Image: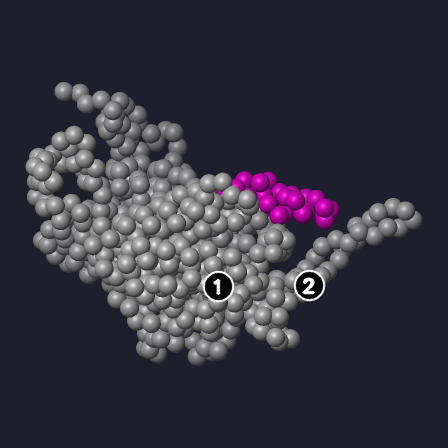
Amino acid sequence: MVIKASITADWYFLYGLTEEGIRFATTCIRVGSLIILMKLPVIVGMGGINAAGRTSGFHSYKRMVYNSLSDNIMHNTWQDLATRMQLSPNQIDEILAGTLVRQIDIFDPNNVYGHKAVEVSGQKLFTPAYSAMAVQSAGMIPRGFDLGKLYSSHNHPRGLMMTVYGMSDALSSLGIEWQSILEKVHPDRISVYAGSALSQVDENSLAGLVELPLKGKRVNSKMMPLSLAEMPADFINSYILNSIGTTGHNMGACATFLYNLRQGIRDIQHGEADVVIVGSAEAPVNPVIIDGFAAMSALSTDDDLRKLDGVLTPDYRRSCRPFSTNTGFVIAESAQFAILMSDDLALELGAPILGSVANVFVNADGNKKSIASPGIGNYITMTKACKLAQDLGMQRTYVHAHGTGTPQNRVTESHILSEVAQNFNIEDWPVCAIKAYVGHSIGAAAGDQLAATLGAWQYGILPGIQTIDHIAADVYTKNLNILLASQHFDMQGCLINSKGFGGNNASALIASPQFTLDMLAKKHGRDKISKYVHVNDKVKQKVQENDEQACSGNEQIIYHFGSQIINAEELQINQESINLKTFTKNIELSNLNHYIEYQ
């Protein structure tokens, strides 16, 4: 939105907006006598699945902090998990044991298939061999939850099955029918940025391409295309949303989710999209990926855990110990998808306002000795995010640290956080690290953090690092409050931090629902907010109904294969627009020139 303004001294007088109003509009750019006021990307829905359970309804968050919530609040979460795990809601001990980080149970880690080289009569032969894995802990979706039975998933890699489930869950959390949104939005003003960091690597995708010929079996025609890292976005566009808008996937190792989030919010901020889907699906809990990370000495092995605790039996539940005496990170699977809208569309539709994304900052590490080691880039991203929080007037923020649970991370990330806190005069800055609960899902990791962030604003509890009982001696703690136990806090903003192999650093500033509403009230006026609240009442009721149905096992999985094909004959093209029979609104061609103004 472009608004003409007169400039007097340091004041920018926008018609209908004070200087404070400009500040709370998040971002504005002055170009000569023009002020370009950017739209605020509002989080209106989020869904998915990880080791703690289903994302929508804040159930995965509630599972993490269950011992800080009342039985009444936890009732539907136990029901939801029980439904997925083929248990009854009163089997809480079994539910607890089959969620979060635990011993691997989606395959037998003590009986992994491989080959052994033997020499017979001077000829080298390879014979089948089975062995136990050195790493036997992981963060996996709830035990007993069979994604493949929910829809026609024949030959789909696990990451894509999780995509279908996670995106369906996200749409359910929205409380508004997708078709209703399409009636308001031009079909090319929808963006989808999603994928994985490690591609699809299981027997139905890349691993199958490599392994099956060695086992004397044939590969099939689906394995190669379904291996691609951007396939989650492709599945969402084709089989779930029937979207013809912008699409893509921005990979950044462990910062991948935030890289995609940055792409999405820029589309909204710059007026390129009204609705954005951002996400990542990662399914790396398989012997191939685990062996690869183990070869880097990056993972927490059984022997490491035994030595750490001086015991014979590893404590798998406490495999990940961020900022404490630790040994390595814990691999995990997760699929997380956020739905964002421009602020004006969110208000018009009465969509849930779960928070907003003020910005995402990305910086590389520059030159360093090891490509996998951390560098200076994360100091820059966290400083920028903290400065933006200060400029927006946020008085109370906290940090969702990357917190992998490795000896190197505990030193380097704590130093970054401590330095930033000191420079901005932040005392006792609360720090969470939820990989202690759900493990490290690589490309989806920041999605896990965002899901927990949104849950904390609903229930007011920041999840503590409950797998540790002390902070390691080499951890920097000045001006930090690394939470060992879950605590009640009232926070206006959260800084989500991600650090990735190769020097990929990203930090996002997320505003709370109330802070977001305050921003929108200053930008749009209280009358518009009042109208929004009235429309939102019905949407909230629908969200609750959808959640109740999902808890009882009646959730709707969306997967349309070949049923919504748009043929070329259904297109009508002229110089002003492209008309598609399938969509209510046209694709307008009159706003493509951003360079020359014709008088």
Numbered disc 2: secondary structure = loop
* Residue furthest right in the image: 121
Q: Is residue 308 left or right of residue 121?
A: left
User: Label 1 sits on what residue type?
Assistant: Asp
Q: Is residue 472 left or right of residue 579?
A: right
Q: Say if the magenta span includes residue 142.
A: no
Residue at the spot x=31%, y=44% of the render? 265
Q: Quadrant of the C terminus?
A: top left
Q: Position of residue 423 (x, y in %)?
A: 31, 54
Residue at the spot x=28%, y=50% of the render? 387
**What label sits on residue 474 in the rendered view?**
1
Q: Position of residue 236 (x, y in %)?
A: 41, 46
**First reached walking from the N terminus: tag 2 or tag 1:** 2
**Residue closer to the observer: 129 or 560:** 129
* Residue furthest top in the image: 599
Q: Are marks 2 and 1 in contact (CB under 8 Å)?
A: no
Q: Is residue 164 left or right of residue 275?
A: right
**Residue closer to the observer: 466 or 368:** 368
Q: Position of residue 443 (x, y in %)?
A: 47, 50
Gap between marks 2 and 1, in whole Å? 34 Å
User: Label 2 sits on what residue type?
Assistant: Ala
Visible in this render: residue 63? no
Q: Say if the magenta span includes residue 212.
A: yes
**Residue closer to the observer: 86 or 39:** 39
Numbered disc 1: secondary structure = loop
Q: Position of residue 556 (x, y in %)?
A: 39, 57
Residue at the spot x=25%, y=24% of the render? 595
User: Of tags 2 and 1, which is closer to the observer?
Assistant: 1
Residue at the spot x=87%, y=46% of the render? 123
Which residues are drawn in magenta?
A: 206-230
Visible in this render: residue 70? yes
**What label sits on residue 132 in the rendered view?**
2
